[in-house]
Amino acid sequence: MATRENQGLFIAVILLVLLSVVLAVSTFFGFAGMREAADQRDSYKTDYQRATKESNGYQAQAGIYMAMLGVEDIAVNEIETYESDLVASNLTDMINQTQRVKETWNADMAKLASGEGGADRTYRKLVEDFSNAIADQHANTTVLTNTVKETEQKLETEITTKNKQLEEKDVQLAKAQTDLSSEQERHEKTRIELNQRLDDTQSQFEKVNRELQDTESDLANKTADFKRNLDAAKATIIKKESTITSLTAKETNVADGQVVNVAPRLGKVTLNLGYDDNLQLKQTFAIYDQSASKFKSGYGKAMIEVTRILDAHLAEGRITSQNINNPILTKDWVVTSTWDPGYSVPIAIAGFIDLDGDGRSDLQRLISIVEGVGYGKVVAYHDDDGKVIGEIDENTRFFVKGDDPLGNAVDGYRKLEQDRERFQTREISVQEFLHEMGYRNEARVRRFSENLSEDRFKARQPGGTQVDSGSPFGSGN
């Protein structure tokens, strides 16, 4: 009986020992698993904090860019707050990159922004300032047009031409404004794409950033081109305002010429002006009494229009209006404000020039025709290699256009065409230009007289062409 009780106690002790061993082993592995779980939790927490800082950094950089652009109602004075968040992200490359962009933005605002600071120092406000400047220029142009309409009837044709040029300038400025708006929309779309990619990888962000830099560079180039075109338009308007002011002078004490003969019954007069003075057909003059010393606009006693140019300093005109109580007399003064003796019309020539249809260039021949008779001066043209000689400016009156150029000449033609659009020079075909000058292919015999020396004789042009005697180039009937 005692033996059985000892056996039960022995078995109980063995079981207790085994249970203790199992419990010890379980406790050891349990603590080891807890330590591993704690280490993994700390690693996840560190990764989460780093990712949170990077995300905050991306959002801070986007906020800075949107404040500089002036969109999403983010004020400029919030940039400092976003900069603090960006610094806290510890993204060194992003911080340096944003700092460079900010320095460029500050430099742009210092040069171009009209505001003293604050919300006005944004790229969006800069575009608005350009738009306002264009609107002001348009208003000034409208005032100028209304002023021109009030000038005298004899200037109506010239003033109408100037008004058309100013309207074309308005269209050009409006187009530039539209282009700026399109660029602004494209820039806004790029910014939205940047915000959508903030959660992408670093390589994707760098790609978007490069695209944004390219867009900003393109916008800067277009802004510079617009400013150059705007400056050119302003210079053209100032030049034309000066011309209009000189044309609308109300009084002068300098006459342009004198009446040398009168045929009242025929309604004709003869003047001491001719082709050496660069006189043109249909030029109008007011007649003032020979005793007058000052010539006030609108107070002449008659009006005449040039119908024929007879000699170097001799022309015939018809009487268009007169005071029958104060007839025109020999030695009466002739005065006009729309013509200057000796003035050569500035002309540009472009394209392939073929006057006689033989397929060969007649450029030099056309230049000789224009300049040889003293009517005009060729200020710009291109050769067969596309090289541009001279330049077009706001004073150039005609853009004489030939046939479409070939080969390398296309480059020169395009350059002159761009300048023509920039200064709104009047485009005219070769044949129309020659007709307007009065040049024609008609042979003519001229007799020498005591009033015409041999050195004034004009040889016939190659191919049987001859200068029209009734044109500004001619010298007879």
Image (cartoon, grey):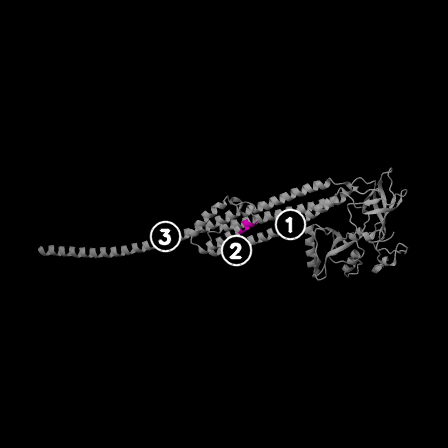
**Lateral position of residue 179 relative to residue 9, left or right:** right
Q: Looking at numbered disc 1 in the image, what kind of residue is underneath it?
A: Asp
In the picture of the structure, the residue carrying the numbered disc 3 is 45
Q: What is the x, y in percent for residue 1?
A: 9, 55
Instruction: Say which residue appears at 62% left-offset and 50% top-offset.
Output: 227
The image shows residue 173, relative to residue 466, as above or below, that is above
Question: Neighbour class for label 1 at 10 Å: few (<14), some, many (≥20)?
Answer: few
Residue 438: tell me if it is visible.
no
* SS under mark 3: helix
Q: Nearer the viewer, residue 111 or 205?
A: 111
**Lateral position of residue 151 relative to residue 97, left or right:** right
Question: Neighbour class for label 2 at 10 Å: few (<14), some, many (≥20)?
Answer: few
The residues bearing labels 1 and 3 have C-alpha atoms spaced at a distance of 60 Å
Q: Confirm or deny contact between disc 3 and disc 2 (CB under 8 A).
A: no
Q: Looking at numbered disc 3 in the image, what kind of residue is underneath it?
A: Lys
Q: Nearer the viewer, mark 1 or mark 3?
A: 1
Q: Confirm or deny contact between disc 1 and disc 3 (CB under 8 A).
A: no
In the picture of the structure, the residue carrying the numbered disc 2 is 210
- What segment carries the magenta color? 107-111
**First along the sequence among labels 1 and 2:** 2
* SS under mark 1: helix
* SS under mark 2: helix
In the picture of the structure, the residue carrying the numbered disc 1 is 231
**First along the sequence among labels 1 and 3:** 3
Q: What is the x, y in percent for residue 117?
A: 52, 45
Q: Nearer the viewer, residue 294 or 110?
A: 294
- Magenta portion: prevailing SS class: helix
Instruction: Say which residue appears at 76% left-offset and 55% top-offset.
Output: 377
Q: Looking at numbered disc 2 in the image, what kind of residue is underneath it?
A: Arg
| Count of numbered tags | 3
Instruction: Say which residue appears at 49% left-offset and 56% top-offset.
Output: 206
**Lateral position of residue 139 relative to residue 65, left or right:** right
